Each structure stands twice: as structure tokens, then as C-alpha cells.
Amino acid sequence: MQDPHAAPRRILRLLAAAAAAWLVAAPGTADAAKPSPKKPAPAARPAAGTISTKYRFKKPRAVRKSTKYIVLHTTEGSSKGSIAKLSANGECNYVVDTDGMVYVIVDRSRIAYHAGLSMWNGQTGLDSISIGIEIVGWHDKDITAAQYAALRKLLGELKAQYRIPDENVLTHSMVAYGNPNHWQKRKHRGRKRCGMLLMLPAARTRLGLLKKPAYDPDVRAGRLKDADPELTKILYTPMPPAKAAPKAPAAVPDKPAPAKPAPIPPASAPAASASNVIGPKRSAWDIARDQYDAPTTVYAFPDGTTKRGDQVKNWNKMPAGTIVTVGPAASENANEGLLTIGEDGTAEALAGDAMAATSTYYFPPGRPYAAGSTLSLADIAALPKGTKVLVDYKVAGPVTAKVPVFSLCGSKWNHPDTYYWTSAGGLVAGDQVTDRTIPKGALVFFRK
């Protein structure tokens, strides 16, 4: 017998399904009011001066015995690659990124290898007495507002902790110097332009620095030659005289809007518009400085051929019209230690007037080393290709159980530009040894 209620029940089920579908789709229903899934909010930008240890250098470094200076650098490269390189080599204490984030690379109390071949007021090797701060950017461009704010905060902390006066906040371009080379026959200032715009009065003011050195003490004393007068003009532009505080007015006017910081004039940076073309008064060194013979520097010759800096053999025959492109250095202070006759140039090109000095040392392949002062000019000219050269070095040793290396060269014992020599093993760089693996009986060669 057929169920008399079956048809009505089917109709009710159909109506219920239709009503449910309408409730889901209808605007204003409870389900429709549910918000759609939101995209995650973008991460907030860090406050200027936020400290991060994300890129901290892992290897141990010696504690500085004193801290007299702060040295400011520009990375001459973009953020990611620069920070990775600096952290891999422990080449600074801090990096200030373009967004104002401050990365700790080497603890502020410990030695970072940032200044390289450096001198200030007769003191050499500033790594051992200074804090190095890298700012992501270029020597001929202004830094960001966030970097100014972060750097001002960081400098305030460091100056207070170590009692460093404003005039001892320097730039790498002020303290770096070069040994004699093919173009400069004496030790000279001008090897780096790193951080130079941070010495302009407008930049110093934004960093809370009211004083600066009035001149280069090492050039004035004759210890170094000024090889870059344009750079000198930028570095020692005098600060404006301090203004007397105005008297309080009888009636207090409306509070004026805060004055904008004075901009850094582009015209103050000759390097920003300087040609990168070799000509009668512009050499490879004038353009590339200490990177002139680096593999990352490329020379495009007028005939259409190109060579890397490490492939150029005759710097006397660089044709006018050659275009020079300087790439990022593999290290902040590359090409400052061991040089090689044949690969890097002749003895005269590598050592200049110091090629026969007591502080210049030659290491011919398979032969004992010799100081330049023990060789005649003819002997030096006859040194074979592959001879290693150290310029402006001291030698001490040998290292023995009773004469540890620390007593010979102090904290420089494991610097990358310190070298250990034995007749059997040749030269080994300081950052390639530990205090337990230094060859017994080795002589240690280190920066003066």
C-alpha cells in the first residue's frame, strides 16, 4: 500500500534544502557575516637603532686593551652581500642597515679586523684600539634618515661608555694609508674614500658630533704623503662656529616647526661625478685605489678587449680611454698583506722607495727570505716571479715553548695579515693557525 505521506515529506525535504542554500548565499546572514581569511599583516619595520645578533661572528676574538677611537665605514655594496661578507670575516663590530637595524658582528669590547693598514697621529694598527662601524651604502652617497637616527644613538652609547670625544670619531678614509706602489713612491693617505661624506659638517651635526679634527696629523708630521687633495678637502671642511644661545623673548611666540636637517650637498663629493676613464692625469690607481689590481676590477680597453685587475701585467702601458669598473672587494681590506712579484707587479711597483728598506722582506721560491736592506738594487730586480713580498713589517722569533707568540707580537698573533715562516713550510697567515698549531721555531712577521 502506498504511503499517503511520502509525497508531502519529499516536498518538505526539497523546500528545506532550498532554504538552506538560500541562507548560505543570502547577504546579511550569519554565515555571510563571517570575515574572509585575512592576509598576514606585513612585519613592522624595526625602530631605528634596534639591535640584532643575527649575523654575529662565531670565532673568538681578543679583548681590546684600550678603546680610543670609533671608525666609520661605508660598505660600498648592498645590504645582503655586504653583511654576509662582514660577518663571515669578522670585519667590524657593528653594521647599520638602511632601515636602521643595527647588527652586532663582533662584540664591542673585542677586536674586529676593520681598519687594515691604518695610522692616526703616529699610532698604527687601529684595529687594536678602535671600534669599527660599517654603514650599508657608498662613499659618495648620503645615508638614509633611519641610518642617521640609529648611528646617532649607537655613537652616543659608545662615546659615553668608552669616554671617546667627538673628534675621535673618524672615518676609514681618514685613517687608512697605503704602502708605496707603482704610482705613489711613499707611504700615502688616500688609499680609501670609505665614509668620507660622514665628515662633512651637515652629517656630523645630524650624528650629534660637534667637533672634528682640523687636519691630518700624519701628513702634517711628514709620516705620510697626501695623495688625494680632493679627499682631504672633504674630510677637513671645518665645522661652523658654535652660535651663542639666543636670549629668551619677552613674549613666547607660537612654537615654530622643527628645522629640517641641512642636506649634504652633492657637489661636496667629487667622486660622485668623477670619470672612470684612464687619461693623461687619471691613472688606474686614481680610479680604483687599492682595488686597482683586484680580480673584481675590470678594464675595458679601447680595442674592445677586457682584463681583470689581476690579469694586467704592465701598468705603464694602460691606454688612455680605458674604462675602469670597480666591483666589490672580497674583503674590506684586501690586497694589504702578502704581494707576489709577477702576479701583482715588479718589486719597484710593489714597494716603491721602500723596496730596499729594512722593513721590506722578500721570500723567493725555495730560498731563504731576505730583508730589502741586505740586497742590492740589482739583486732585487733579479728576484724571480713568484717571490712573495711584505712591506712595512717587523720580524720576531722564533716561537718556542719558552717564547710564546703573544710575547712577540701581542694581539696581532692571529691577524689575517700576520704571517709565520719556516724554511720547511713557507708562509702561513695568522688567521689559518691556532695558538696550538703555530709551527715551532717559526718566525712571525707582523705589521709595524
Image (cartoon, grey):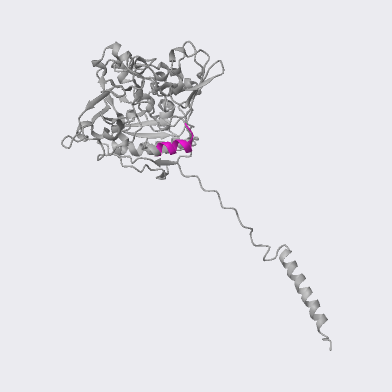
Coordinates of residue 66 in the picture (x, y in percent) = 26, 35
Is 402 on the left-hand or right-hand side of 384? left
Magenta stretch contains residue 218: no
Frontmost residue, 422 versus 152: 422
Identified at 45% across, 38% down, the residue is: 97
Image quadrant of residue 135? top left
The vertical placement of 446 against 50, above or below, is above
Tell me where residue 273 appears, x and y as whole percent: 51, 20
* Quadrant housing the N terminus: bottom right
Q: Is residue 402 left or right of residue 303?
A: left
Name the residue rendered at 44%, 12% in the picture: 316
Which residue sits at x=76%, y=74%?
16
In percent of width and height, residue 154 lies at 38, 38
Residue 164 shows up from this direction: no
Q: In this orientation, which residue lies closer to the viewer: 364 or 255?
A: 364
Q: Is residue 296 above or below residue 346?
A: below
- The front one of 345 and 383 is 383
Q: Is residue 39 above or below residue 385?
A: below
**Which quarter of the picture shows residue 333?**
top left
Q: Classify the position of the C terminus by image quarter.
A: top left
Q: Please report the bounds of the magenta region as a residue range.
A: 77-87
Image position, residue 121 (x, y; %): 28, 23
